[in-house]
Amino acid sequence: MKIKSWFRKNWKEIIIDLFLFGFVASLVVAGGLLVWISTLEIPDLSTFDERRVEQSTKIYDRTGEVLLYDLHQDVRRTIVPFEDMSRHIKNATIAIEDDQFYNHIGIDFKAILRAAISNFTAGDLLGGQGGSTITQQVIKNSILDRDKKLSRKVKEAILSIKIERILSKEQILEIYLNESPYGGTIYGIEEASRSFFGKSAKDLSLAEAAYLAAIPQAPTYYSPYGNNKGALDNRQRLVLDRMRLNGFITIDEYEEAKNQEVLFEPQAVTGIRAPHFVMYVVEQLAERFGEEAMSEQGFKVTTTLNWELQKEAERIVAEKAESNTTRFNASNAGLVATDPKTGDLLVMVGSRDYFSEDIDGNFNVTLSSRQPGSSIKPFVYANAFRKGYLPATVLFDVPTQFSPTCEPTSLSSESPCYAPSNYNHKFVGPISMRNAMAQSLNIPAVKTLYLAGLKDTLKFMADMGLTTLNDPDRYGLTLVLGGGEVRLLDMTYGYGVFANGGVKAEPRSILKIEDSRGNIIDESEVKTTQVLEENVAYMISDVLSDNVARTPLWGANSAINFPNRDVAAKSGSTNNLRDAWIMGYTPNLAVGAWVGNNDNTPMGGGLSGLITTPMWRAFMDVALLKIPTETFPQPQINTSGVKAIIRGEYIDTSLLLKAMEEKDPEDKEIKIDVATVYNNIHSILHYVDRENPTGGYPANPANDPQYENWEYGVQKWNQDTFGVLLNQPISNNELREED
């Protein structure tokens, strides 16, 4: 009570004391800050016209001897006066970079505060979102080092205020537009305008200017020649939105520019080897170190690329793609090779010709999301094997309606029904998962996905590296037939997990990075994670390398058969033949190939194997000569106590064995009730609870929503096959044939 009373009497004095304390503390902090600022060495603006010495980043193959690309060996910059620049590029740049350019004194306090709060929230006070004005960027690009230090930020702010007293706003903007990087060796708005649109900067249209203003924030990422064209399009629309909001353009101008189709000139790049791979690496470097560091720090980047294999791959892809264009209307192709043990990207061919205008050759198809067709099936079977199913497990390849809302008798696939067929429109009846996967049969594959579980299989695929299948609600059972979209690069790494006994090696394309003095500033390590049970991986490899199992589809002496090497392979294509794939691997090499058209138009004629295999086989023949011979370990399978249908028996053979034991040796006929056998043939859902397939038998199989439809197809096959034998004896010869 005394304390409360004291506070009531003295609350005014307390508030005054706290205020005075805060004021004094602020003066101390401010004084300390001023003292610290006074100790900083601020460069003299007389050095403004002296540009830093740029030391270009050089990218090498895995030997460190073959130069793939010198990023800035041919820097192109054309200086033009302010009046020779389109008003649209001036306004577009101000709108997206610094809309208060004409109102501030060189720094924008609101923008700095906004960026500081955002970066503090993100946990990176000096990184992340920028609050720099155009004036600050001019200083940063011209005088200061670009290290992320508070002292550099302070120097930048002081010099920005100073330079605003010396130069006019127009002069500062002119310097900025003449100095800005637009990707690769292109610097300045005039060079960018001529490189991208074949015209001078003074002739840029509004839509073109908006594109150019969008690029400098991240020139590598927003390159119109890379794989992020969609992101560039979105940012161009953002520039137009900002211009409209700032009153730089009218509504009519805005609508016209937004709807204008802008065409970019073909990319002009010389002196580059493995261009798709190099650009893939450059994007990683830019994201990690920043555009400026790559142009100034003189990095030597040793990559994972095997130049000898890359040369052969480029030659083979070009030759086979030319043939495919004529034979199958397939104008493009891509190929990727990785080392499953290390995760090293050894080969990346993103198109038949990087410099081709006809096919947008600079677009890297290995990073493009496409439908994989049946090449996705091994991931589904692998997840089923993880749950206790085996390569010998029997499924019925019979006409089946998979939608519980549709009648079992219906074979329609019109929504909401779904009754797929096989590639040859034939059905083989009971078949093992081994043969179903090797022969790429669709009905057993859809059943396998149902048994494995859609959401669980998607999660498993993500663990294997297929990161683009991230929307479970979008997919149904069609996923196993290629209903999702994946990248060739990710698929190759995913198959590499099978090759490496279930161990996923994290993808890497850079081995080490050295600075200009030869000091190693980064050296990557092999990072691995067991994402799949070892024995399951061996099962998949055993099936995909089983030439007997795949013979009905491929023939005994097919192009995917290597008599003296263990090679697993799986092809795939979409129903409309827009994409054709083949994936394959040995224990120490994974190779994926894709054939199709960049614009997603269908190919014509031929199965996917005919289209993709010659290219894949030609590369494998070269590559296998350069790597050691290794074999796949045999899977260990114990069927003791395993349900008959899981271990490979769909007929209760104990009935037949008992009849053989009891028959009279002189009797040429076995007295067996065929109806007993007939009545014991069912779909796998009759025997397994898919939530616990290796556990007990389901109390009521009909509770499964798919049971009625699956059972109908099986019983129809059963009637067609065994119905005529009811109540007829089976001869010894027939029994031996059946057995």
Image: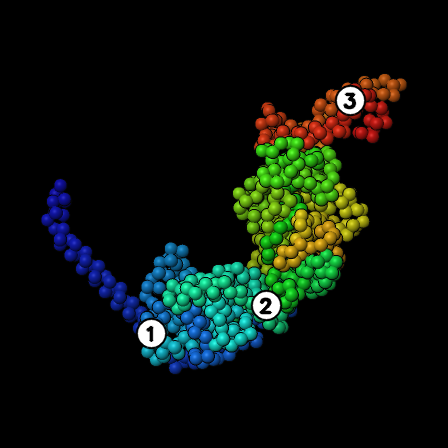
Mark 2: amino acid: Ile
Label 2 to label 3: alpha-carbon separation: 75 Å
Mark 3: amino acid: Leu
Label 3 to label 1: alpha-carbon separation: 99 Å
Numbered marks: total: 3
- Asked which quadrant contains residue 408, the reply is top right
Can you tell which of label 3 and label 1 is closer to the viewer?
3
Q: Which mark is residue 59?
A: 2
Residue drawn 87% across and 19% down?
667
Residue drawn 32% across and 66% down?
109
The residue closer to the viewer here, 489 or 53, is: 489
Quick one: SS at disc 3?
A: loop
Residue 175, percent from left and from top? 43, 77
Q: Which residue is mark 3?
A: 726
- Mark 3 surroundings within 10 Å by alpha-carbon count, few (fewer than 14), some (14 through 19), many (20 or more): some
Tell me which numbered mark, 2 or 3, is placed earlier along the sequence: 2
Whether residue 408 is visible to the viewer of this picture, yes or no, is yes
- Mark 2 surroundings within 10 Å by alpha-carbon count, few (fewer than 14), some (14 through 19), many (20 or more): many
Tell me which numbered mark, 3 or 1, is placed earlier along the sequence: 1
- Asked which quadrant contains residue 73, the reply is bottom right
- Mark 1 surroundings within 10 Å by alpha-carbon count, few (fewer than 14), some (14 through 19), many (20 or more): some
- Where is the N terminus found, in terms of image quarters? top left
CB contact under 8 Å: marks 3 and 1? no
Q: Which mark is residue 161?
A: 1
Quick one: SS at disc 2?
A: strand
Residue 379, percent from left and from top? 63, 44
